[in-house]
Amino acid sequence: MKDLLKLRRSKLISCLHESVVQKGFKRPLVAFSGGPDSCLLLSGLSVLSKRKSTPADFSFFAFHANHNLRESAKHDEDFCVDFCKKINVPIGTVKLNFSSLENIYHRARQARYDALFDFANSNRCDCILTAHHGDDFVETVILQSLRGVDKSKIGIKEISNWKGLPLIRPMFDFTKIEIESILKNHNIPFVI
């Protein structure tokens, strides 16, 4: 984490500046799992917030949803809270509980996005950022194609909408390998 400021002139900071600051967003909320992708996104936003070209009233939050579906869920939540303390980023958390595992992937995603939206609204955030990257995009296209989804609806949009709030995915220009390399080069921790 001590090497975080080396990110100042990186491709990541340029992408975040273009996707967030240039579009006029001043109070984003980062969906933060503690995984490699979201640790890089949150670290990059931390660096971006300290640049002279970023408006003085720019502030942001992190939000972690603990789905309570894995043994490591509490460890991951603790990691996220500690990570945010180290880089001085306010974080909100929620513990989600599910009465059954039926259709759990869809229900967990829905509950997570609902909690993100509620937190964003209560903290006057003007957009939500997720760390979807290029590999996620390709995987989604392949899976949707195999399922026979209409070609006009295939893929993930870089900017979409969740209940009237912009949902931005600024890391589509990055691959998983590139993300892991940046994390290693800048000593940024993460959980798997």
Image (cartoon, rainbow, N blue to C red):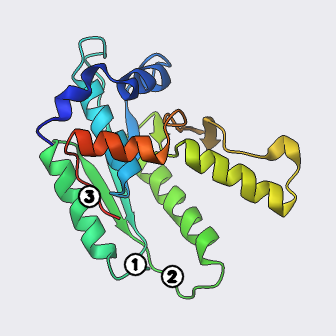
Residue 83 visible from this viewpoint: yes
Count neighbours of disc 1 (C-alpha within 10 A) and say few if under 14, some if 14 to 19, many if 20 or more.
Answer: some
Q: Where is residue 58 in the image (x, y as percent from the top left)?
A: 30, 24
Q: Position of residue 159 (x, y in %)?
A: 61, 34
Which mark, residue 80?
A: 3
Is 186 displayed left or right of 155 in the figure?
left
Q: Please tell me whether mark 3 or mark 2 is closer to you in this view.
A: 3
Q: Position of residue 131 (x, y in %)?
A: 46, 45
The C terminus: image quadrant: bottom left
Distance between the alpha carbons at the discs numbered 1 and 3: 15 Å
SS at badge 2? loop
Q: Do the residues labelled 3 and 2 touch (CB within 8 Å)?
A: no
Between 140 and 81, which is closer to the camera in this rendering? Answer: 140
Q: Mark 1 points at which residue?
A: 68
Q: Please tell me whether mark 1 or mark 2 is closer to you in this view.
A: 1
SS at badge 3? helix
The N terminus: image quadrant: top left
Q: Which residue lies furthest to the top in this view?
A: 53
The amino acid beneath tag 2 is Phe
Q: Do the residues labelled 1 and 2 touch (CB within 8 Å)?
A: yes
The amino acid beneath tag 3 is Cys
Distance between the alpha carbons at the discs numbered 3 and 2: 22 Å
SS at badge 1? loop
Mark nearer the N terminus (1 vs 2): 1
Instruction: From this view, report whether residue 144 is shown above or below residue 98.
Output: above
Mark nearer the N terminus (3 vs 2): 3
Between 27 and 50, which is closer to the camera in this rendering? Answer: 50
Which mark, residue 98?
A: 2
Mark nearer the N terminus (1 vs 3): 1
Q: Which residue is drawn at 34% across and 74% down?
A: 73
Residue 121 visible from this viewpoint: no
